[in-house]
Amino acid sequence: MSIQIITADITELNVDAVVNAANTTLLGGGGVDGAIHRAAGPELLQACRALPQVKPGVRCPTGEARITPGFRLPARYVIHTVGPVWHGGAHDEPSLLASCYEQSMALALDHDVDSIAFPAISCGIYGYPPERAAPVALRSLRASIPADTSIQVLICCFGDTMASIWRAALNDAG
Ligand code: AR6
């Protein structure tokens, strides 16, 4: 298992799966969600619409994940997950964020994915401080990846400032 931090536009990566930082409707939005929908084409929205609603308007509760094809993306799959909105850290944000990484990895492993790229879930519009998100994410990923798998895990940062925060967390974790 290897975890690497890179700086890139996630929509351009040649990986088996990209993870989308979505919202509970799964019907698109701004940030990386908007970029993934634009690059994947309108078929992605159709595929998301076709996913069952667990309650009115909610296709993916916070902390859970769903999978669709990648359509026009280089990636075969998009794994949509919904990170928590940051409300100061005492509202289950760490466990919900950890769950996003864990559930996304579980779907990837179920679909025999060899390489997967994650954005910095919740670290944009949802306001999670990246210095706090990165260690939670890395711990969750390490716990989610079985020792006997060779899956390549990329953390795809949008800009060097974000990447250096994640690199520091990766180094801290040894
Ligand atoms: N490639 C890689 N990372 C990106 C890209 C890209 N093309 N574009 C943005 N980022 P955000 P969230 C980075 O806001 O905080 C949407 O409206 C971005 O710089 O995309 O989980 C959804 O529909 C940041 O570091 O996701 C939800 O409503 C990281 O991706 C809400 O935003 C995550 O930022 C989710 O907010």
Image (cartoon, rainbow, N blue to C red):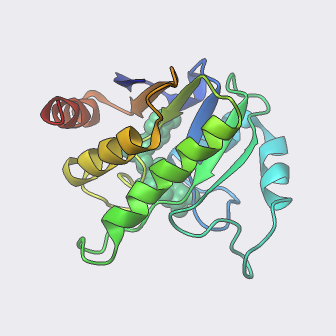
Picture residue at 22% right of the left edge, 29% below the top: 167
> Would you place residue 76 above or below residue 23 in this image?
above
- Which residue is more in the foreground, 6 or 148? 148
Name of the residue lying farthest toward the bottom: 56
- Which residue is more in the foreground, 42 or 71? 71
The percent coordinates of residue 117 (x first, y second) are 51, 31
Q: Is residue 145 visible?
A: yes
Q: Is residue 118 left or right of residue 52?
A: left
Q: Is residue 79 left or right of residue 54?
A: left
> Would you place residue 108 above or below residue 128 in this image?
above
The percent coordinates of residue 132 (x first, y second) are 22, 54
The quarter of the picture where the N terminus appears is top left
The percent coordinates of residue 44 (x first, y second) are 78, 45
Picture residue at 24% right of the left edge, 71% below the top: 89
Q: Determine which quarter of the picture holds residue 42.
A: top right
- Which residue is more in the foreground, 161 or 113? 113
Picture residue at 58% right of the left edge, 22% below the top: 12
The percent coordinates of residue 5 (x first, y second) are 34, 26
Image label count: 0
> Would you place residue 93 above or below residue 167 in this image?
below
Q: Determine which quarter of the picture holds residue 122.
A: bottom left
Q: Is residue 109 left or right of residue 139?
A: right
Q: Determine which quarter of the picture holds residue 48.
A: bottom right
The quarter of the picture where the C terminus appears is top left
> Would you place residue 70 above or below residue 130 in this image?
above
Q: Is residue 125 visible?
A: no
